[in-house]
Image (cartoon, rainbow, N blue to C red):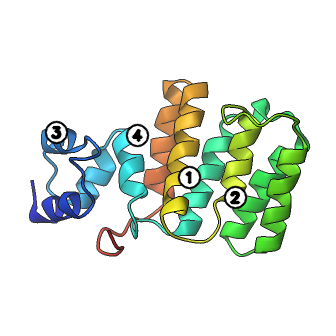
Amino acid sequence: MSKEIIDFCNKHDAAKHGFNTLINELGCASMQDLWMTADINLLIWLATRPGVLSDGDLRIFACFCVSQIWGLLTDIRSKNAVHVAEAYSVGKATEEELKAAAQDAILGDCVWKSEEPWALAYNTATSLGSGEYVNIMPSWVAAKVRNLTDSAAHKKQAEYLRMAFVPSFKGGEK
């Protein structure tokens, strides 16, 4: 295992999250190799470490995950929340529009249940700002979507992360 991988793992407490053994077994020569060979769980963990992907990239990934269960979103307001979250991520919607879309997603459904598909849309739209919450939300959304989908959808999540984003393994704070 390279010094780059060891330093990254130490900085982000890979052992605490249960990834040290898996990372060792993969035997990658660089963080880029690790990015390209990791399973979806490790890949999402890597992507959600501070500084690896931007907040906007993480939100776009969460939107992609929700799009995998689009047919389960029964209220147009939930779908709109995902559209607005994606637009916000690329500077085409304001924070106020994002908050309003998130509130509309709640109003579209009577009972709050975090397992419900509309809650994924709401949580995608409400991961505002920067910091730990933004890093956690895409991981939570992706995990919930994986619970509602099959292994083919999991592979699509991994492929999307690898192809849509260029990670930075240098920046970020612990």
In the picture of the structure, the residue carrying the numbered disc 4 is: 40
CA separation in Å, label 3 and label 2: 34 Å
Disc sitting over residue 21 in the figure: 3
Amino acid type of the residue that numbered disc 2 sits on in the rendered structure: Thr
> Would residue 29 appear left or right of 59 to someone viewing this image?
left
Front-most of 1 and 94? 94
The span from disc 4 to disc 2 (Cα, nearest Å) is 24 Å
Residue 137's label in the rendered image is: 1
* Type of amino acid under label 4: Ile
Tell me if residue 52 comes above or below residue 82 in the rendering. below
Residue at 61%, 58% in the rendered image: 60
111 relative position to 174: left or right: right
> Percent x, y for residue 57?
55, 63
Location of mark 2 (residue)? 126
- Using a 10 Å C-alpha cutoff, classify the residue at mark 2 as few (fewer than 14 neighbours), some (14 to 19) or many (20 or more): many
Q: Position of residue 156 (x, y in %)?
A: 52, 39
Disc 4 and disc 1 in contact, CB within 8 angstroms: no
Task: State which tag comes first along the sequence, 4 or 1.
Answer: 4
